[in-house]
Amino acid sequence: MKSFRDELFAYVKKKYRTSPEYLWMRYPNYAVLRHGDNQKWFALIMDVPGPKLGLDRKDNVDILSVKMRDPLLADILVRQEGFLRGYHIGKGNWISILLDGTVAFEEIRKWLDESFMATASQETKYKRRPPKEWIVPANPKFYDVIAAFEKADEINWKQGKGIKTGDTIFLYVAAPVSAILYKCRVTKTDIPFRFDNGEVHMSSIMKIKLLKRYDPNRFTFDVLGKEYGIFAVRGPRGIPESLSEALK
């Protein structure tokens, strides 16, 4: 039967392509898990005598130390059975989790994933973040997006900073339309493309696929301001939850 330690190693090997590193001769069972790009630790597995953890047992216990992004969350967790303040990593938001069955393996994996993201590089966070919704401006002065979507349901578009494949974008067509007209899915990003006419500058483009059309009188500039607090769409931006629900 596999131990929690073995299951965790198998999990990070499959999901993160990471293997444990044993760095200390004095502590042969202490294993570090680290990112491949920034080399930061995102977990430390140790076998520690029970009394050192404040437990009423003398044998060694496997624990997993992980980092939380939210200090309040760390404070809440350490009040629950099976969770402790970070052993040997007391600074910051590190906590330790007993690997003796007190905490379910599914929950342990969740906090391991949390620690991975808490310590990840910006590039890794970008790649692994869940799909996001954006409002993206379309200026008829430079490109007739209405005509483009009459000819095809997938078109090229200027690459927006922070946007990645799988994201959803709502195209806000500027004056004289001044309204959100289209819901699209980003199907491909980071396509090399050089363009500069003095007003529009592009170094890469993305492909977007049309999913839905909206009545030009529904999500107008006035409605976006009065009902959703959006008073300008000058570049790609996130959207409030209330607008997201309305657009669905």
Image (cartoon, grey):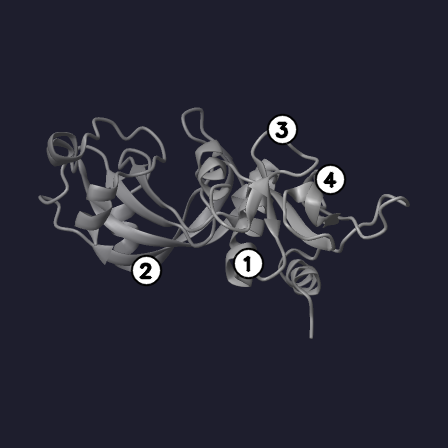
Q: Foreground mark, 2 or 4?
A: 4
Identity of the residue drawn at 53% across and 46% down: 114
Amino acid type, mark 2 = Asp
Identity of the residue drawn at 50% across and 38% down: 74
Residue at which label 1 appears: 102
Callout 1 secondary element: loop
Residue at which label 4 appears: 39
Total label count? 4
- Expressed as whole percent of the image width and height from the top left, the position of residue 109 reads 56, 57
**Label 2 crowd (10 A; few <14 / some 14-19 / many >=20):** few
Identity of the residue drawn at 48% across and 32% down: 71
State which tag comes first along the sequence, 2 or 4: 4
**Label 1 crowd (10 A; few <14 / some 14-19 / many >=20):** few
In the rendered structure, find residue 153 and report the number of the disc placed on it: 2
Callout 2 secondary element: loop
- Expressed as whole percent of the image width and height from the top left, the position of residue 81 reads 50, 50
Q: Foreground mark, 4 or 1?
A: 1
Amino acid type, mark 3 = Lys
Residue at which label 3 appears: 91
Q: Foreground mark, 1 or 3?
A: 1
State which tag comes first along the sequence, 4 or 3: 4
State which tag comes first along the sequence, 1 or 2: 1
- Could you tell whether 70 is left or right of 27 in the image? left
Instruction: Tell me the distance, in whole angstroms, between the alpha carbons under discs 3 and 2.
Output: 52 Å
State which tag comes first along the sequence, 4 or 1: 4
Callout 3 secondary element: loop
Q: Foreground mark, 4 or 3?
A: 3
Circle 3/circle 2 CB separation < 8 Å: no
Amino acid type, mark 1 = Thr
Q: Foreground mark, 1 or 2?
A: 1
Amino acid type, mark 4 = Gln
**Label 4 crowd (10 A; few <14 / some 14-19 / many >=20):** few
